[in-house]
Image (cartoon, coloured by chain):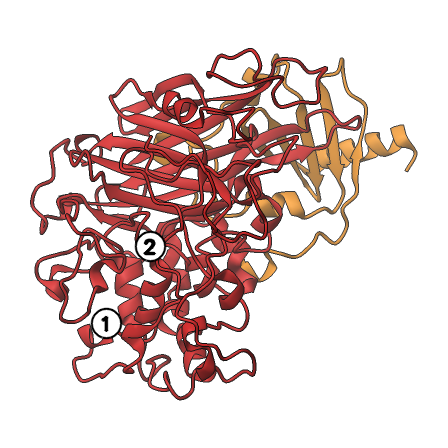
Amino acid sequence: MTSHREAPGISTDPVADNTDLYAFVSPDKPSTVTLISNFIPLQLPPGGPNFFSFGDDVLYSIYVDNNADAVADITYDFNFKTTVINPSSFLYNLGPIGSLTDPNWNVRQTYTVTRIDKSGRHVLGSNLASPPVNIGPRSTPNYTTLANAAIHTLSDGSQVFAGQRGEGFAVDLGSIFDLLTLRPFESLSAFPGPTTDSAQGVDTTVDLNVHSIALQIPKTLLTKDGSNPTVVLNQTSVIGVWSAASRQEVSVKHPNGGSPMKAGPWKQVSRLGNPLINEIFIPLSQKDYWNTQQPHNDKQFSQNYLTSQVAGLMPVIYPTALSGVPNGPANPRSDLEAVLLTGLPSSILGVFQNYTGPTLADMLRLNMAVPPATSPSRLGIINNFPTGPADIAGFPNGRRPLDDVIDIYLQVAAGLIYPLIDSTFTPPAAAGLLGDGVNEPAVPFLNSFPYLPTPFDGYFYDAQSNGAPEPYAVGSS
Amino acid sequence: MSEEQEDPRVANQEPSRRTFLKVSAVAGATVAAIAAGASVIPKMAASGAAAVKTSAGKTETEAPALSSHLSSSEPMILVVRGEAVDVYRGENKFPIQDSALARDLTSRVAAKIQV
């Protein structure tokens, strides 16, 4: 998955596990940018009685670099607090939850948003309510109303939402983790197994939820000089974004089951910029370490991009279709380095750039001067490459929920855009066709903030349905 | 941010000896966790992760003086490793390099619990 359970350490700490990060110009409010950072992967909707929630002992952060040095100029910190109204009960709710102040709601969570920038620390909002999780038609009968009530306006005019959402990242996990099988091409695999070559993959995350922290921020609050970015080729139009979760350095368990004693400075235990970096570029021996590092130190990992393990495996697994995938010393993957560690300079595509200088750093790079696409393509900039039309409002120009980063990564790893750095190279013919057969989530995204779907509820969850139509309350928030 | 780098080759190693001994609290406020020879906590401290978060996570500022925290009701955790004593209170960490203090703490604790 993009960063779900991607490292040994964080796979045992789901509350702090940063799973997906999105950064895009808001399609319905183009004067703003939306940043969404997801945590707590693979939530089974019926997961009571102690339903999923943010960690009171975790510091969640979203970072923005606006002067191209891969060091945070703006930090948004999120601190959560859980309150149990009736600790004598074992129930999450004692009746239907009709509002965010309903006395039936027993286990609640509130949070504080703090912005840290060159002018200091600013608490933008406190005691902000997260919505309850989506339990079922009796407990949370009007879930969309509850979720809408949990969209708050901060003191600087930004909007915030923090709570459960439906998983928007669609992927055929079962197939990919079975020796990198792609169902549409499985007859070409070097390993024996089914050979149905089904064009349709299996959306493994179709009924699962995550917890999202979403911000919708005026662009003028993100640029280094407070200007409104309008010129695509100006460096000041580009921001770098990453997010992280941190825990205090020391934790001592309470001998009688009370809250553990925490002390010491916050230590980063999970981070995320571009999707799939720690997942498929970083070897097992370095994954936990990578999670502790800052983007401006990412030069130490550059060899994992120049010689990509996935690119190296492709001709092994698909010897007939992908024998010509570039990799290694003869064909170092400078294309991956450019896309993922520096951004694309204007010399590559001419009409677009998201270059942030020579510092190698894993950040989502968003050129805020690019307006939202009127007909967005799930393949973003590589749509119908090289003839196009490229959708420069999509990944790797930031990342929208609809961007199919699995298929984009597969095609780029197979060498699709390698001719941009080596005009004599001809990619394998199959490169532009690769995909897992899952192009979009079964449930549509919302048209407005916070964009990710209404969470799936526990009552209607059907472990066998795998995406079959069900009466989920999806409506537009 | 801290520029300190942790050797990735040892990042996942378990401490050779993890003997946390929890000893008496003073009025419920002080707990000393003595980790004789433990390596896990100092190793975490040496990582390049976000430490004391200040201006946009850019720089790690020095923690305020411990004396300003002595009246705090928050528990204080001491970790003794070799000749170093790390003091944790609230969100702060106070590293003390003092072999005499480390030896004194270790021997006093050992005497209390008859190790």
Whether residue B50 can be seen here: no
Q: Evaluate whether residue A207 shows in this view.
A: yes
SS of the residue under disc 2: loop
Classify residue B41 by image quadrant: top right
The picture places residue B45, in percent across and down from the top left corner, at: 56, 42
Colour of chain A in the rendered structure image: red
Helix, strand or loop at mark 1: loop
**Rendered-image quadrant of the C terminus of chain B:** top right
**Is A88 positioned to the left or the right of A53 in the image?**
right
Is A337 located above or below residue A226 in the figure?
below
State which chain is coloured orange: B
Residue A353 picture location, percent across and down: 15, 56
- From the viewer's side, name the closer residue of A321 and B97: A321
Q: Residues within 10 Å of mark 2 (few under 14, many from 20)?
A: many
Which of the two labelled residues, at mark 2 and mark 1, occupies the earlier sequence position? 2
What chain is tagged by disc 2? A
Amino acid carrying mark 2 in the image? Ala
Could you tell me which residue is drawn at 13 percent across and 70 percent down?
A387
> Which residue bears the numbered disc 2?
A361
Residue A105: mark: none
Q: Nearer the viewer, residue A9 or A464?
A: A464
Quadrant housing residue A473:
top left
**Chain of the residue that carries numbered disc 1 in the rendered image:** A
Which one is nearer the viewer's eye here, A185 or A271? Answer: A185
Q: Amino acid at mark 1?
A: Ile
The correct choice, above or below, for A44 with respect to B71 in the image is below
Relative to residue A232, is residue A253 depicted above or below? Answer: above
Residue A417's tag is: 1
